Image (cartoon, helix red, strand yellow):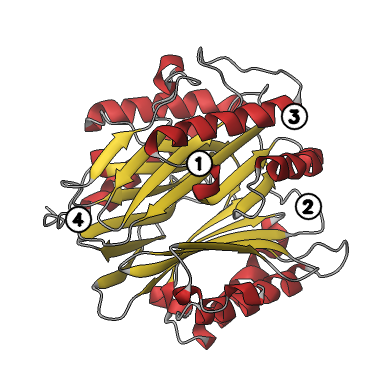
Amino acid sequence: MSQATLAIHELPLRTECACGKDTCSGEVVALETPYATEIYFRCAPTLVEGDMDFEQQVRRFYGCLPRCLDHAGGNMSHVVLERAFFEDFAEDMGTFQTVRTEAYEDAGVASGDFPATTYIQQPPCRRSQKIELHIYAIVPKPGRSVSIQTFQDESTQTTAKLVEIAGYKHLYIADINGLSGDAENPGSFREQSDRMFANCAQLLQQHGITFPKVVRTWCYMVDIDNTYAEFNLSRNAFFAVHGVNRLPASTGIEARLYPLQALCGMDLYAILNPDGAGIEIMKTPTLNEAPEYGSAFSRGMMIDLPDKKVLHISGTASVDEKGDTVHLDDPRKQIERMLLNVQELLKPHGATLKDLTQAATFLKHAEYLELYESILQEWGIRTVPNTLVEAGVCRPDLLCEMEAVAVLPKRGGNGKPAPAAK
C-alpha cells in the first residue's frame, strides 16, 4: 500500500486512500474511535496482465499487510477477519495456505489466533488477478479496554472471533458449512443447508446466545439459480423454530466453497449483549421488504454503539419498491439503481455512500468491470475498499449486487455502558 497510510493514528476520524503502486488496485479506510483504530483493507495484487503468478500475488499481499498495520501502530495479531476471493480453489488453495501460514507465523501469531477467514471461489473481475482479499483489523488504543479472543471448533472446522469494545461483545464466525462428515455422502443441497443452520445454532450456544442475537449473515451457495428457493425454505423453517423475528441483514450470492463438496456456506455476526445498543432495521421507499417475496432478511441493520454507528447494508440489486427487477438487460441502469438503493438505505441514518468503509460488488459478467468503475468515479466513491468479483446473483435477470458497511465514528465514546452478556 502507499505511503498515504503512514501515521493513520494521527489522522482525523476517517481517512481513505488508494494503493500507490502502479501494478496494484486496492484501498484502505481507517477509522479513529475513542477505543481503537479500525482498518478496512482491500487488496488486488496486480493490474498488469501476466505480471505475477498466484504465489507471487499472495506473497505481495502478505508482504504489504504487516507494513500497513505497522503504520497504524498495529501488527498481524490485530487482523480479525479475512475474506479471500479465489479464481480457482483446486489450483491455488494449497499455495495460499502455505503463504498465509508463513506470514502469520513469521509475525509471531500462533495458529490458534489466526483470523477468522472465509474462502470463496468468485473470480476477480480483473482477469490479471487470481485472488482478491479484504481484511478487517482492530488496533486497540493504549489504556483502552479492547479484547480479541479466538475460538476454534473442531466439529465444524470453524474459527470465531469475539471482540469486546466499549463493553459490547461482538461475535464473528466464518466459513460455516453443512457437510455431513462423510466424504462419500456429503448430502444434498437441502440437507447441507439444514445442517448449516443447525451448526450455526450449536456454535452460538457455545457463547450463550441464540440466533435472534444475530444481526448480519453472509450466505453462499452453488448454482444459485437452482438452489436459492431451497435455501429460502431451509432458512424460513429454521427461523420459525428458533423464533427469529427481527430478521438479520443478509447477502445471498453464488459461490464455490471450500471444501469443494460444500454446496452452501455462511458467515455470521452477532452481538452477545445487545441491550443498550440502538439496533434498527434499515428501510427505504425505493425497496420493498424481502420477506414479501419469500426471503427472510432485512434490507439493512443499523447498530448505534458508544464509539460508532455501524450500518450493515444487505446484498442490494436493481430492485424497485414493488420487489421487481428493473432495467432488464441494461447493465448501466442496473448498476445505477443498485447504487441508488444503497444510497437511500443510508440516508435516514445520516450517512452517504462516502461513509462506506467496505463493500463487495458481484457482477454477473466480468465484462461490466470497466463500466462499473467509471460509474463509481461518477458517484465519487472510487476509493472505498470495494471487492469486485464475478458471481451469479439471486435472480437470473439481475446483473449486479452490492453489499456494504458504513461506519460513522464518534468522538467522545461516553455512551451508556454495555450490560453484561447473558
Q: Which mark is residue 332?
A: 3
Residue at 50 percent of width and 49 percent of height: 355
Q: Is residue 280 left or right of residue 421?
A: right
In primary-sequence order, the first of circles 3 and 4 is 3
Q: Residues within 10 Å of mark 4 (few under 14, many from 20)?
A: some
Q: Secondary structure beneath disc 3? A: helix
Q: CA distance from mark 2 to mark 4?
A: 44 Å
Q: CA distance from mark 3 to mark 2?
A: 18 Å
Residue 241 visible, this angle:
yes
Q: Nearer the viewer, mark 3 or mark 1?
A: 1
Q: Which mark is residue 352?
A: 1
Q: Amino acid at mark 4?
A: Gly
Q: CA distance from mark 3 to mark 4?
A: 43 Å
The residue lying toward the viewer, choosing from 416 and 147, is 416
Name above or below for residue 33 compared with residue 263: below
Q: Nearer the viewer, mark 2 or mark 4?
A: 4
In primary-sequence order, the first of circles 3 and 1 is 3
Query: What residue is pinned by disc 4?
Result: 415
